[in-house]
Image (cartoon, coloured by chain):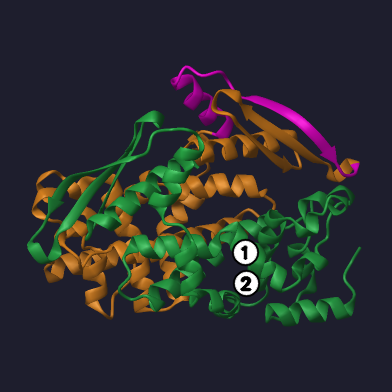
Chain colours: A green, B orange
Amino acid sequence: MSLNPSQIRALQQALGYEFQDSSLLSLALSHRSIGARNNERLEFLGDSLVNHVVAEALYKQYPTAPEGEMSRRRAHLVKGETLAAIAREKSIGDCLELGVGERKSGGHRRKSILADALEALAAAILLDSDFETAKSVVFSWFQSRLNDEASFAASKDAKTSLQEWLQGRGLALPEYHLVATRGEDHQKVFVVECRVPSKGLKETASASSRRRAEQTSAQRVLDRLQ
Amino acid sequence: MSLNPSQIRALQQALGYEFQDSSLLSLALSHRSIGARNNERLEFLGDSLVNHVVAEALYKQYPTAPEGEMSRRRAHLVKGETLAAIAREKSIGDCLELGVGERKSGGHRRKSILADALEALAAAILLDSDFETAKSVVFSWFQSRLNDEASFAASKDAKTSLQEWLQGRGLALPEYHLVATRGEDHQKVFVVECRVPSKGLKETASASSRRRAEQTSAQRVLDRLQ
């Protein structure tokens, strides 16, 4: 099964990029279920490209946001759900090349397959052009979401997520301890430890507010649990 | 404490880059222990830049390596130990701005502080120049290691690491099950599931060889454990 010219036109328009080398486009759309010539290598490269483009956009858009906030914003933007939503807006699912089994079981609607294909397309654009071109295309995919404060606010913060994770497993709630404060009044640094005794985990984090240090320590515990 | 001109010269030479804006260099060297004006935001941006530059270098250097192998190679190159070793080669520790407490407790030799500073320097170079310049500088930091097959081979593969992790905790060894094979003879895809019943975890992976599918599934379980 391969794409007809009008599908290719529509997809390129939705992506905001016209390929010189159409074999790169086709490779990016080839799920591993169709065989060894698939988009897994492109996905590897595209994942890092998307991460970097989003990181740089956040760095510039939020010039005073602390690292922890930028990390949370990025995690929200590059998670599978968001990438799959972008892929759906561009009808990438209709263009995927899937093996028979995957096609029959609805692989073209599967979140992970859509997210991987979007990352692979980012890499294909990079290889077909240059970094600055690929960056501006990838940036355009995320632009509306970079400004979507409501959606970000609705995404759960790390302390809430950690609490829900533990409650869902009938485990005791985490404990937060202020283990140190450093520095002068106007530039104090708070060091907080988040403890989850039931999992034998503790992680510390420091930040210029106690609340942010708690959030970051909770995120570090979550990273180890997930 | 701030750097004298000969220290700045030596550092820039070691990095392979001369800053236009020396305040970016100084910011990248400022650990959070000295206050709110520190390198944490730069580290966030630099982390993604280093990841992407290394991913692209591996993509080009190993044109037939499967995604799982590139991921392992990248993990080996961008882990804290490697970044800290590069930072040490460039004597970055001598140039760090640390708070009194960190300085007294040997913070300028601490692995995580060195690794973070190297990432922050990568971002500072990006902001001081442009992507292509920053990419070639960062690439030069990793170049000898990109070719260092011996060091990579000595890094443990995912199956070995997983086994050791479980043994260290007195837990049963993982089980690998071939759950499907797909495709024609010369482009078969093997789907393997790695199971760790003691942790209630299972992860599948597919690859063009059974061994690689096992490695990737083990890596996915490891990612969830760690």
Q: Tell me which residue sits at (55%, 66%) in the image.
A: A49
Q: Tell me which residue sits at (23%, 59%) in the image.
A: A209
Name the side, left or right, on which A46 lies relative to B121: right
The residue carrying mark 1 is: A83
Q: Which numbered disc flags the more N-terminal residue, 1 or 2?
A: 1
Which of label 1 and label 2 is nearer to you? 1
Residue A118 position in % (x across, y down): 67, 65
Q: Tell me which residue sits at (77%, 63%) in the image.
A: A29
Q: Is residue A113 visible?
A: yes
Parent chain of label 2: A
The one nearer the camera, A151 or B67, is A151
Q: Magenta stretch: give its range.
A: B157-184
Parent chain of label 1: A
Looking at the picture, which amino acid does disc 2 mark? Leu
Is B192 situated above or below A136?
Answer: above
Name the side, left or right, on which A186 lies relative to A98: left
Looking at the picture, which amino acid does disc 1 mark? Leu
Quick check: is B165 in the magenta stretch?
yes
Residue A189 position in % (x across, y down): 18, 57
Q: What kind of element bears circle 2?
A: helix
The residue carrying mark 2 is: A126
The one nearer the camera, B23 or B144, is B23
